[in-house]
Image (cartoon, helix red, strand yellow):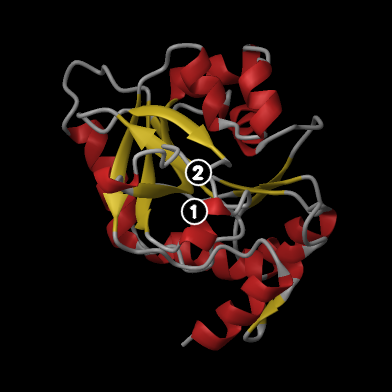
Amino acid sequence: MIPARYAASRFPAKLMQDLQGKPVILRTYEAAVNTNLFDDVFVVTDSDVIFNVIVEAGGKAMMSVKEHECGSDRIAEAVEAMDVDIIVNVQGDEPFTEKESLASVLDVFDNDPTKEIDLASLMVKITDWEEISNPNTVKVIVDNKNFALYFSRSPIPYPRAKEVGSVYYKHKGIYAFRKRALMDFQRLPMLALEATEKIEAIRYLEYGKKLKMVETTVSGIEIDTPEDLERAIKAWK
């Protein structure tokens, strides 16, 4: 499921921006389909414009009935009546979505016979302090089994003791959920930490869900700003 809002505070209508001949959202949809990992792929949107561009290209799209604060809520509404076990959320602004990273997230559930894990997501190592300090870059810290401890727009951990040489990880906004975890998310109210940081993954942690992080070396380009779009255009092959 690819949640797709037309409005975006930092870059309005970013999903409809042209990326080498096709809108960003269509590039993302095609990338998800081309992994051949999924039984079905849908764009879930509040926008007639986005809905039409996907359908006219032969893709599958659904219109949200309600207003939603975040992508998880939008997806939960869409899959509530579906008979599915695992739902993957690919962000609409990730046209460089690729198979290897998505497959590694899905492997988490194949290796979880007791169904302890509620959801899984991706992280990538970052070393540039400007990126680490950038509030648009969501950072994650994990325990010794790679379960998420916290997400923040601030640098975490704070480098008070620089000689320790802490590793920093950027959270990539791809999730795989057990359906029950997603349905729980929809009915549980937002708490203070999520509201403060504006990071939906925090809600799962605040309510005690087990979120397994998988490290990837594939960074890709998420299109949050016009500058990101320029980088994506140059990188597209």
Identify the residue under disc 1.
132
Q: Quadrant of residue 111?
A: top left
First in sequence: mark 1 or mark 2? 1
Name the residue nearer the viewer: 125 or 182.
125
124 sits to left or right of 52: left
| Number of the label disc, if any, that sits on residue 22 | none
Q: Position of residue 223 (x, y in %)?
A: 62, 65
Is residue 190 visible in the rendered image? The answer is no
Q: Position of residue 107 (x, y in %)?
A: 22, 41
| Type of amino acid under label 2 | Pro
Helix, strand or loop under label 1: helix
Identify the residue under disc 2.
155
180 sits to left or right of 137: left
**Other residues around mark 2 within 10 Å, as few (<14) / some (14–19) / many (≥20):** many
**Other residues around mark 1 within 10 Å, as few (<14) / some (14–19) / many (≥20):** many
Q: Residue at x 45, y 24 (%)?
A: 179
Q: Residue at x 53, y 67 (%)?
A: 95
Q: Residue at x 27, y 28 (%)?
A: 143
Helix, strand or loop under label 2: loop
87 sits to left or right of 167: right
Pointers 1 and 2 in contact (C-beta within 8 Å): yes
